Image (cartoon, rainbow, N blue to C red):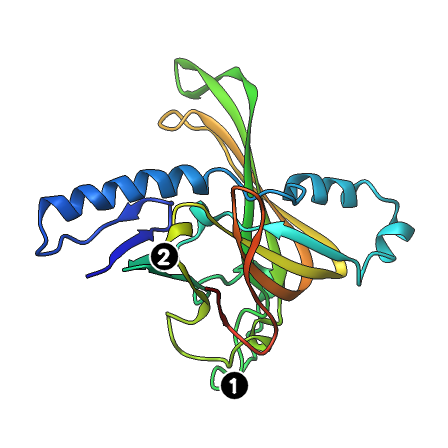
């Protein structure tokens, strides 16, 4: 009987109850606590996506145009991933990162004339990298007649790696389980990270902004900025978050790796 840790869309773990009863449930919750703590601490050795994006954004146009082809490494935010799971079976662990729903749904990524039998409606896929929340004060405003409220101003920056060459790694499949996976020793189950290796492509960076105005019922001006590092995926590494050691490496032409 294995133990499975599944992270939902919001990073919330789900554990199915098994016939092993309360002892297995307790064990799973212990594993859960350690895994979640680890996921919130990024793997070592890469610059945060926020810094990488901002450094590129500050470049003059001529320098930015020279960046395509430059290699980057970014740590994937597993707590923000809906398709990440860890299955512990005896002395081994099966790690899976599903890609089925990692589609960028912004207008610039639509291909309405795509033939669904052979191509995807959304051209670019994404890997979530980092989310940064910034509180920007508050102001007095009357949204409901006769009622003045303090409206907060909140911004959030979400960072992603955008790439279109997912099928360099595995065939295009109508399978929700399709993605990257690894067979690893169970001893690394509670300190796993995932790192993407890529090289930049035009236009190097992209950004979109969505704004929600504060209302009486929800007194927050909320601005969401989605920021993309535009690249071609070169590989995915499963890493030990304690020291950044690469446990196993996925290269183009494969979707799975293992190590003893």
- Secondary structure beneath label 1: loop
3D distance between C-alphas at marks 2 and 1: 29 Å
Residue labelled with disc 1: 118
* Vertical comparison of 9 with 108: above or below: above
Image quadrant occupied by the N terminus: bottom left
Residue visible at 43% across and 15% down?
149
In front of the other: label 2 or label 1?
2
In the drawing, does residue 91 fall left or right of residue 259?
A: left
Q: Is residue 205 left or right of residue 86?
A: right
Classed neighbour count for the residue bearing mark 2: other residues with Cα under 10 Å, few (<14), some (14–19), many (≥20): many
Query: Which is nearer the eye, 207 or 23?
Result: 23
Residue 5 screen position, x and y as percent: 30, 52
Disc 1 crowd, CA 10 A, few/some/many (<14, 14-19, 20+):
few
Q: Is residue 80 above or below residue 65?
A: above
Q: Position of residue 219 (x, y in %)?
A: 42, 24
Of residues 81 and 124, the one nearer the viewer is: 81
Kindly identify the residue that appears in the image at 23 percent across and 59 percent down.
Answer: 2
Q: Position of residue 104 (x, y in %)?
A: 54, 60
Q: Which residue is mark 2?
A: 85
For the residue labelled by badge 2, is the local secondary structure a helix, a strand or a loop?
strand
Residue 251 position, x and y percent, is 60, 71
Please state if 174 lies on the left or on the right of 55 as rendered: left
Q: Which mark is residue 210?
A: none
């Amino acid at each position: 009987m294995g133990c499975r840790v599944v992270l939902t869309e919001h990073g919330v773990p789900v554990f199915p109850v098994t016939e092993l009863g309360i002892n297995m449930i307790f064990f799973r919750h212990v594993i859960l606590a350690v895994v979640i703590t680890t996921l919130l601490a990024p793997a070592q050795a890469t610059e945060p996506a926020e810094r990488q994006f901002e450094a590129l954004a500050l470049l003059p146009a001529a320098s930015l145009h020279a960046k395509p082809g430059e290699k980057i490494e970014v740590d994937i935010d597993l707590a923000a991933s809906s398709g990440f799971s860890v299955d512990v079976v005896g002395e081994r662990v099966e790690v899976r990162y599903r890609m089925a729903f990692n589609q960028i749904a912004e207008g610039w990524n639509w291909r309405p004339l795509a033939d669904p039998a052979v191509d995807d409606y959304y051209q670019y896929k994404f890997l979530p990298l980092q989310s940064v929340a910034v509180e920007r004060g508050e102001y007095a405003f009357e949204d409901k007649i006769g009622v003045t409220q303090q409206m907060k101003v909140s911004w959030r920056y979400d960072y992603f790696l955008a790439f279109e060459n997912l099928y360099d790694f595995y065939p295009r499949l109508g399978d929700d389980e399709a993605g990257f996976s690894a067979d690893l020793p169970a001893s690394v189950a509670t300190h796993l990270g995932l790192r993407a290796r890529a090289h930049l492509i035009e236009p190097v960076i992209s950004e979109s902004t969505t704004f929600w105005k504060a209302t009486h019922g929800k007194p927050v001006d909320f601005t969401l900025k989605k920021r993309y590092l535009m690249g071609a995926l070169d590989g995915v590494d499963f890493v030990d978050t304690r020291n950044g050691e690469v446990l196993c490496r996925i290269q183009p032409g494969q979707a799975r790796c293992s190590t003893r």
